[in-house]
Amino acid sequence: MEKIILTGDRPTGRLHVGHYVGSLKERVRLQNSGLYDKIFIMIADAQALTDNAEHPEKVRENILEVALDYLGCGIDPEKSTIFIQSMIPELTELTFYYMNLVTVSRVQRNPTVKSEIQMRNFEASIPVGFFCYPISQAADITAFQATDVPAGEDQMPMLEQCKEIVHKFNTVYGDTLTEPEIVLPDNSACLRLPGIDGKAKMSKSLGNCIYLSDEPDEIKRKIMSMFTDPNHLAVSDPGTVEGNPVFTYLDAFCRTEYFSGYLPEYHDLDELKDHYRRGGLGDVKIKKFLNNVIQSELAPIRERRRMWEKRIPEVCEILRHGSETAQMAAARTLHDVRAAMRINYFEDTSWVENHIRGAI
Ligand code: ATP
Ligand code: MG
């Protein structure tokens, strides 16, 4: 069986370091591993419209921003197909058929959808399209017969839903679709990176992000303003590491070699944590170290992004070409889906012939 990746992001803003550690870094690693036959990376504009219907310009403007973030991180258009979701009408048609295989109460149980509804204050007025986006996401994944989906932890319920749809479809209509597996980051700090405000998730919609394209002074300002342990008032106070976002970021980003360059009095992160727990280590010192770490990680991404910013027509061509390639792949799956459902009326005309025979 071919190994195929499908993954993507909503163009609701520029991408942030949560996307990077939760999914982008893993995508680049998998892309360069040579283990995959095909890699599809989707800019999910149709999904972004499900909660931004009145702001299509926001979605449109962010398509290039997301594409630039991809290229900046090292997504290579020679190895990965980057495409725009709404350019593939086959995805909408698949969604429409899959909707019949899912109950309303099943979608209502999805914990990610539940928390997103709350976050957007949608309670009494949920757009139907938003409510159904896990089904459309199942269409996105299965259209490419994806075997692997590198994503953050919040996507686990979507993958469960997708597997159920695949199982139901294959049971009712015969084996047609491939069951995908989520690929989560190994490092638990990367599963759901908190915001700089200490909220559970860094998210474009919450405005608590360090963006991959932020300038160095902006990154520094954000890091120095980060939440830490609220009970760590004096430097001498013992501090808490668990749930402290500054340490979660260090868990996510810090490599041991950074200590010799930026904080040589410690050997590794464990030593730094122990000192913080004991007391006698100030927040400012750790934040300065974290700033050096994140600056080192983001500088090459920002530089590569800048290089692509000067080549926008080429970026647009990458998206156009990628969308054409993706459309052909999705069309093949839709063809098989229609055949399995026996709604390929003019390709398999046995229904007409049977009718004629019956009539004679
Ligand atoms: P929005 O607020 O518009 O939903 P978002 O910041 O949640 O935006 P998405 O485009 O929904 O970003 O997510 C894209 C991918 O990035 C998904 O795989 C998701 O799991 C991952 N991701 C997003 N935020 C984080 C985070 N804070 N930590 C780890 N992974 C994340
Ligand atoms: Mg999201």
Image (tube, rainbow, N blue to C red):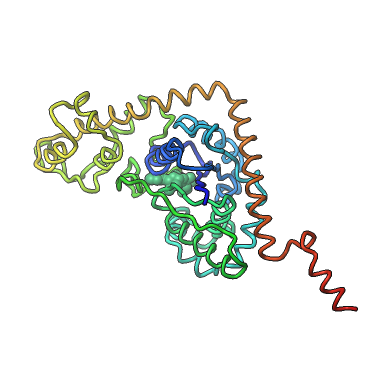
What's the residue at 45%, 62% (across, down)? 110
Location of residue 154 in the rendering, given as x and y in whole percent from the top left corner: 41, 53
Residue 297 sits above or below residue 142 on the image? above
Q: Quadrant of residue 310?
A: top right
Q: Nearer the viewer, residue 29 or 53?
A: 29
- How many marks overall? 0
Q: Is residue 21 left or right of residue 39?
A: left
Q: Quadrant of residue 220?
A: top left
Res 205 seen here: no
Residue 319 sits above or below residue 180 on the image? above
Location of residue 255 in the rendering, given as x and y in whole percent from the top left corner: 26, 33
Q: Nearer the viewer, residue 56 or 90?
A: 90
The C terminus sits in image quarter: bottom right
Res 12 seen here: yes
Location of residue 301 in the rendering, given as x and y in whole percent from the top left corner: 42, 28
Report the residue that reaches farthest toward the front. Answer: 1
What's the residue at 21%, 44% (across, down)? 229
Location of residue 256 in the rendering, given as x and y in whole percent from the top left corner: 22, 32
Q: Nearer the viewer, residue 167 or 214?
A: 167
What's the residue at 58%, 35% (across, down)? 61
What's the residue at 26%, 32% (across, down)? 290
Residue 178 sits above or below residue 48 on the image? below
Q: Nearer the viewer, residue 67 or 195?
A: 67
